[in-house]
Every structure is written in structure tokens, then in C-alpha cells.
Amino acid sequence: GHMRRVEKPWGHEEIWAETERYAGKFLIIRDGQMLSRQYHEKKDESICVVDGLLDLELGQGPTLEVRRMAVGEAFHIRPGTVHRFCARSGDVRLVEVSTPELQDVVRLEDMYDR
């Protein structure tokens, strides 16, 4: 099969696996861009940085934690965990594997007004 490319205001996604039980994709985040601050009600995902440095923001407000993740570092994001992916030091490429609910996104804050 072929990868399905999805253009995003922050870069693009390349979806390489999409089944009834799991999904896999690459996220390419352009320098200075970030995804929305979000959480998922059902979707359970794990990410691994493939290229660049990712700032992973966890939580929000006074409990906000920022983890700078280098190539090869991974993180499991459970349902209900507020998170945001940010590229503050150059372009970032990460791989994500998850349960299949790709539309399950609750956006709390977004620089693109989505």
C-alpha cells in the first residue's frame, strides 16, 4: 500500500498503517510550529522521535511539564492525557503508533484557530 499524506497547518502527516485495531503514522512538524493542546478520550498512542528535537508539553496551566525529546526517545500518551507537540529547534519528524480512533481529538488551545 501507499502512505496517505494529510496536509496540516503545522506540517503534514504520512499515515502508513490504518486498520480496525491500530494505526501508524509519521508527523512532520515544521520549525516554530506546534499542534493543538489536546487530549483523546479513547485513542491510546505512543510516539518516538525520528528526527530533530521535540518539545512534548504535558498537562496545562500550573502543572505544565515540558519534556525535550531527542532522536530515539519514546513516550506513551494514555487517553485523557493533555499533550502538545512543539518544534522549537528545527523541523521534527516523529512516528506514532496508536489505536485506530484518529478522529478522537479534543482541542483545548490551537494557534491556528481550529
Image (cartoon, helix red, strand yellow):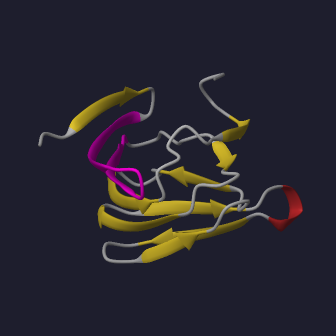
Name the image quarter holding residue 31.
top left
| Picture residue at 50% right of the left edge, 74% below the top | 75
**Quadrant showing the N terminus:** top left
Question: In the orientation shown, which residue stands out farthest toward the bottom?
Answer: 73
Q: Depth check: 86 or 42 in front?
A: 42
- Measured from the top left, where is residue 63 in percent x and y? 84, 67
Q: Examine the rendered structure and indicate whether residue 31 appears above or below residue 61.
A: above
Q: Is residue 15 magenta?
A: yes
Q: Can residue 91 be spotted in the picture?
A: no
| Picture residue at 63% right of the left edge, 23% below the top | 114
Name the image quarter holding residue 4.
top left
Q: Examine the rendered structure and indicate whether residue 43 appears above or below residue 106.
A: below
Which span of residues is magenta-colored?
11-30
- Measured from the top left, where is residue 64 in percent x and y? 77, 63
Q: Depth check: 20 or 54 in front?
A: 20
Question: In the orientation shown, which residue stands out farthest toward the right?
Answer: 62
Query: How many discs appear?
Result: 0
| Picture residue at 85% right of the left edge, 56% below the top | 61
Q: Examine the rendered structure and indicate whether residue 108 appears above or below residue 65.
A: above
**71 displayed left or right of 114:** left
Q: Examine the rendered structure and indicate whether residue 27 appears above or below residue 78.
A: above
Give the main secondary structure of the magenta stretch: strand
**55 displayed left or right of 84:** left
| Picture residue at 67% right of the left edge, 61% below the top | 79
Q: Can residue 34 be spotted in the picture?
A: yes
